[in-house]
Amino acid sequence: MKKLLPILFLLLGLGAGVGAGIALRPADHAEVAQGDGHVEAADDGHAEAAATTTVHYTPRPADTETVRLPNQFVVPLIEDGRVRAMVVIGLALELTAGHHFNLASDEARLRAVFLQLLFDHANIGGFEGVFTSGEALLSLRRTLREAARLEIGPEVYDVLITELLRQES
């Protein structure tokens, strides 16, 4: 009986761990490319979850122009009052042809808005874990795009993340 009890507890713990892992696993968001260039979440039994996280890819229109912001953004990741890592991000703007964006006069204001959003993103843990997943990067790009449209106007088609580096200290 003394030898059977530890084995019973081991099996019970193993079963509870497997059950918790199955119950708490994230929904599988497998993506299936369609012939029209759109990418949608596959229906794998998680139809409701997939419907809320459907990712659409639309190629950029032919009449856009890319303007790269000349300097990278440096975002500190702070833990217990100390900088424990740095994230370096390079960004570019996709603008409609004939835009009125002037890098010399509009860059400072746009950089200030982007930097505040990147700091907020870092403070909510946006650069923790698998921060380079497609869903996480699309969410960040969407936030940056909306802010750029508020600052510059509807001529902003998209904000591209051209470089992304995280350096632990």
Image (cartoon, grey):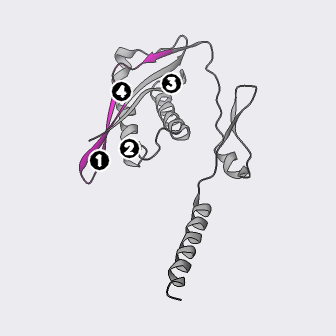
Q: Secondary structure at mark 3?
A: loop
Residue at x 63%, y 52% (from the top left corner): 27
| Mark before the other along the chain sequence, 2 or 4 | 4
- The residue identified by callout 3 is 153
- The residue identified by callout 2 is 122
- Distance from the alpha carbon under mark 2 to that under mark 4: 20 Å
Residue 79 within the magenta-colored segment of the rendering: yes
- Distance from the alpha carbon under mark 1 to that under mark 2: 9 Å
Kind of residue sitting beneath label 3: Gly
Kind of residue sitting beneath label 4: Arg
Rendered position, 49 above or below 94:
below
Q: Position of residue 20 (x, y in %)?
A: 57, 66
Q: Position of residue 157 (x, y in %)?
A: 55, 23
- The residue identified by callout 1 is 78
Which residues are drawn in magenta? Answer: 66-88
| Mark before the other along the chain sequence, 4 or 3 | 4
Q: Secondary structure at mark 1?
A: strand
Q: Position of residue 35 (x, y in %)?
A: 76, 26
Kind of residue sitting beneath label 1: Ile
Give yes or no for contact between labels 2 and 4 (Cβ–Cβ under 8 Å): no
Q: Quadrant of the C terminus?
A: top left
Give yes or no for contact between labels 1 and 2 (Cβ–Cβ under 8 Å): yes
- Distance from the alpha carbon under mark 4 to that under mark 3: 13 Å
Single out the mark in the foreground, 2 or 4: 2
Rendered position, 6 above or below 81:
below
| Mark before the other along the chain sequence, 1 or 2 | 1
Q: Looking at the image, which is closer to me, 48 or 30? A: 30
